[in-house]
Amino acid sequence: MKFYKKIEKPLGQLLVERGIISNKQLQEALEVQKKEGGLIGENIVKLGFAKEEDIAQCISLQYGFPFLSLNNYEISPEVIKLVPKHIASYYCLIPIDKIQNILTVAMANPLNYEAIEDLEYSTSLNIQVFISTPSEIRKAIEKFYK
């Protein structure tokens, strides 16, 4: 798995520094997280403070995964066949390309190492990860898995 340059800061701090949310909004999202659990990025989106794409792009910066928008992205049927729909839906990922022994996937949570290991095992391919938004991935799953 290939990583890009990482920024060692919490997601909330990155969102504040980039002017996407305010400190007050971050504190409110952290309170919600304390009470209800969940991921901070998901809570920020649920509260309406940021869009999924803002979160995905900050996670991309934070962990060094490249961001890929799936809107208007075409995926070949041969690549789709490599990953069953139930696995794509369960892990919120979609295969997007295969070059030699490398399968490139777009994932909502690029840190889900269980998903990556499952894909490596089931496809016998090395996995390269891009990050995309959960809603774009769900739309692509509906579009390409017939």
Image (spheres, helix red, strand yellow):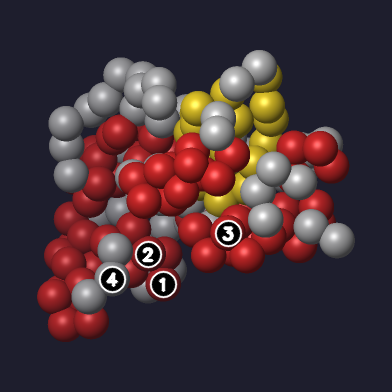
Label 4 to label 3: alpha-carbon separation? 22 Å
- Which one is closest to the eye, mark 1 or mark 3? 3
Callouts 1 and 2 close, C-beta under 8 Å? yes
Q: Residue furthest bottom?
A: 35
- As shown in the figure, which amino acid type bears the numbered disc 4? Gly
Helix, strand or loop for disc 3 = helix
Residue position for label 3: 87
Q: Position of residue 41 (x, y in %)?
A: 34, 58
Callouts 4 and 2 close, C-beta under 8 Å? yes
Residue 123 visible in image: yes
Helix, strand or loop for disc 4 = loop
Q: Residue 77 occupies which quadrant of the picture?
A: top right
- Residue at image x 34%, y 45%? 113
For the residue pair 64 and 51, the one nearer the viewer reads as: 64
For the residue pair 141 and 85, the one nearer the viewer reads as: 85
Residue 16 visible in image: no
